[in-house]
């Protein structure tokens, strides 16, 4: 697969560095052109068939997010180039939006391109960017993207009861029901490691502590949720979880 791409960045040096890395290390990318701002990028996208946009966020006049205001149904995938904080990067990850953290490195570009190739054609970039902007605007992440066979499903984090491991897959149990996604539970644990609502009580269970209705420590520690489901607390986790749960502020 060869993807036609453009680079959008107001800094010539940044464009030059990214162009060199892509040319030398990403043979599947055909760089069509470059743009110094959003309006120029819109003209290029309308002129050419563009599959992928490498998009800087912080630019004068209009930031990178403004690009999506010019298209009702964009068919291009996007990799954001950003120097955002750790929290913001977590918002990118849970929103399933690819990014390259500045200063740019070869390995970061290659990894982002590999991830973007898998998403090309899903045409959900508007929805993912909308979720990203929502997550960036608050102090707690609001939504998470769940990868399905040929699409992404977005759910409110507060609506999740727990994640249950199933080999290389994970069952995500929400108010809407149970969904099987092709991610290991470890990946969700890492994504939500800074979110105090979620806790890994067992190697097979990552739970939303805000959905607990009962914590029973008799005959093996068990947690009951508001939907009637339950999950075990691993024996070696009980003491640590007791301390954690006592500090919860709902």
Image (cartoon, rainbow, N blue to C red):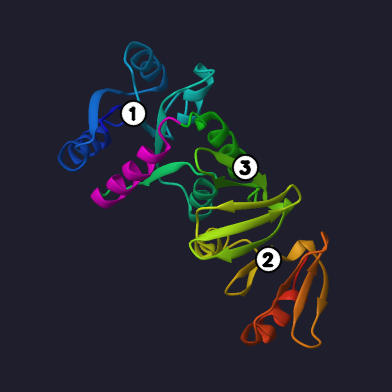
x, y percent for residue 219:
78, 88
**Magenta span contains residue 128:** no
Dot 3 or dot 1, earlier in sequence: 1
What span is colored magenta in the figure?
106-121
x, y percent for residue 118:
39, 40
Residue positioned 25% across, 38% down in the render: 18
x, y percent for residue 211:
78, 61
Dot 3 or dot 2, earlier in sequence: 3
- The residue where tag 2 is placed is 207
Compared to residue 96, the image places residue 192 above or below, namely: below
- The residue where tag 3 is placed is 154
Q: CA distance from mark 1 to mark 2?
A: 43 Å
* Pointer 2 local density, CA inside 10 Å: few below 14, some 14–19, many at least 20: many
- As drawn, which residue projects farthest toward the left? 24
Q: Is residue 99 visible?
A: yes
Say which mark, if any, is on residue 10.
1
Residue positioned 43% across, 27% down in the render: 60
Compared to residue 40, the image places residue 82 above or below, namely: below
Disc 3 versus disc 1: nearer the observer? 3
Residue in the foreground of this view, choosing between 53 and 185? 185
């Amino acid at each position: 697969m060869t993807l036609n791409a453009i680079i959008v960045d107001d800094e010539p040096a940044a464009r030059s560095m990214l162009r060199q890395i892509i040319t030398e290390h990403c043979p599947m990318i055909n760089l069509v052109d470059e743009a110094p701002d959003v309006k120029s990028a819109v003209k290029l996208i309308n002129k050419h068939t563009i599959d992928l946009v490498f998009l800087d966020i912080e630019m004068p006049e209009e930031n990178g997010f403004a690009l999506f205001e010019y298209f009702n149904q964009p068919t291009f995938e996007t990799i954001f180039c950003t120097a955002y904080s750790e929290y913001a990067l977590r918002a990118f990850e849970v929103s399933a939006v690819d990014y390259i953290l500045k200063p740019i490195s070869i390995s970061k570009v290659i990894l982002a391109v590999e991830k973007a190739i898998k998403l090309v054609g899903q045409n959900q970039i508007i929805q993912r960017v909308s979720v990203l902007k929502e997550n960036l605007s608050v102090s707690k992440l609001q939504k998470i993207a769940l990868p399905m066979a040929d699409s992404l499903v977005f759910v409110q984090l507060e609506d999740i009861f727990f994640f249950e491991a199933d080999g290389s897959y994970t069952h995500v149990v929400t108010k809407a029901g149970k969904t099987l996604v092709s991610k290991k539970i470890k990946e969700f644990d890492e994504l939500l490691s800074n979110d105090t609502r979620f806790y890994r009580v067992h190697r097979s269970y990552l739970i939303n502590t805000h959905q607990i209705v009962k914590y029973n420590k008799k005959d093996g520690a068990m947690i009951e949720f508001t939907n009637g489901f339950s999950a075990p607390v691993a024996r070696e986790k009980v003491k640590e979880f007791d301390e954690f749960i006592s500090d919860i502020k709902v």
